[in-house]
Image (cartoon, rainbow, N blue to C red):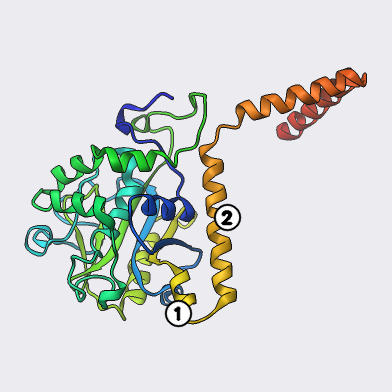
Amino acid sequence: MAEDAASGGWSTIESDEGVFTSLIEQLGVKEVQVEELFSLNADWFRALSPVYGVIFLFKWTGQGSENKAAPQDGSYDRTAVDDEGLFFAAQTIQNACGTQAILSVVLNNDKSVDASSSGADEAGERIDIGPALQEFKDFTAGFDASLRGETLSNSEMIRTVHNSFAKSSPFVDETQRDPSAGTEDAFHFIAYTRYHGKLYELDGLQPYPILHGECTAEDFPDKIVSVVQRRILSYPEDEIRFNLMAVCQDQRIKWRQLDEPNLLQEEERKRAKWDFENALRRHNFVGFTDEVLKGVMEMKIQDGSYDAWVEQAKKATAKRFQERKG
């Protein structure tokens, strides 16, 4: 498959809770899942507690990006990375922003962070990021945002896991255009998470982390709803292409602890569905489809109905074409 020069060998992956959950599991993160939210409601966040952070996907317009002195909302925190150890990386590769946003949440809520610093206020609620990501975080600890972003983009381990969720296709998609040509809408991921009792927006296209004020664990659901609502309201009223996902504790842990077998079973079914869908994404069905079609053709030829079958297909295609023309 041809790679766009801006992709740096990173494939496009789907913005999907099952994809992102499996992705971070394959990176070695334990007992964390990504849950898509269909309503911007603080009660949803409380129901999923503990929530480590939020991933927000939106149409990128460049609005506010030309003003590096101040962000559109909130304020730049120029000292959080050096003085407080906040993990923040510049985005250097176009297709990596979803994975980078998730890592921005996970790596700021791991067990090496003080319990009171992160989105989870109890030691048992912090994230075990596994040895591979811990090594990456330790290695990049003294880097600035630009170098940290370059290191992330060149991580063979992270890139390989990311690319394993790309859709399999033997064809070059001629509809994929150069984003700089301005012919297609571009979308971008950012992360929100608590760190050192503050709410941060982590956007790899910005020069610094964006501070949205003080924030306790109890405040987080209401605070994040308010911040995201302001972001959405900055768009035209007819813009509805947003996606919001919570990075939270594996919900099966909660239902086991509360002895809720029905809810646990529902979560297990959801995991099985995610596994099945991810397997379909990875598989190339062209060969299978070709063999099925050849088998059907042989059957039609043998029973003498091949010509009628072809004519029926032609008429159906012509009918659909006319319907599209209106």
Residue 9 in the image, given as x and y percentages of width and height: 32, 31
Whether residue 140 is visible, yes or no, is: no
Say which label, 1 or 2, has the lower sequence index. Answer: 1
Using residue 310 as the reference point, say whether residue 24 is left or right of it.
left
Give the labeled residue for mark 2.
273
Label pair 1/2, CB-CB below 8 angstroms: no
Quadrant of residue 178 within the rendered picture: top left
Q: Nearer the viewer, mark 1 or mark 2?
A: 1
Secondary structure type for disc 2: helix
User: Does residue 258 lie above or below 242 as drawn?
Assistant: below
Q: Which residue is rendered at x = 49% and y = 28% of the image?
A: 175
SS assignment at label 1: helix
Residue identifier under label 1: 257
Residue 10 image label: none
At x 39%, y 60%, the residue is 232
Instruction: Check the picture and name the quadrant holding the N terminus.
Output: top left
Look at label 1 and name its amino acid.
Answer: Gln
* Tally of numbered discs: 2
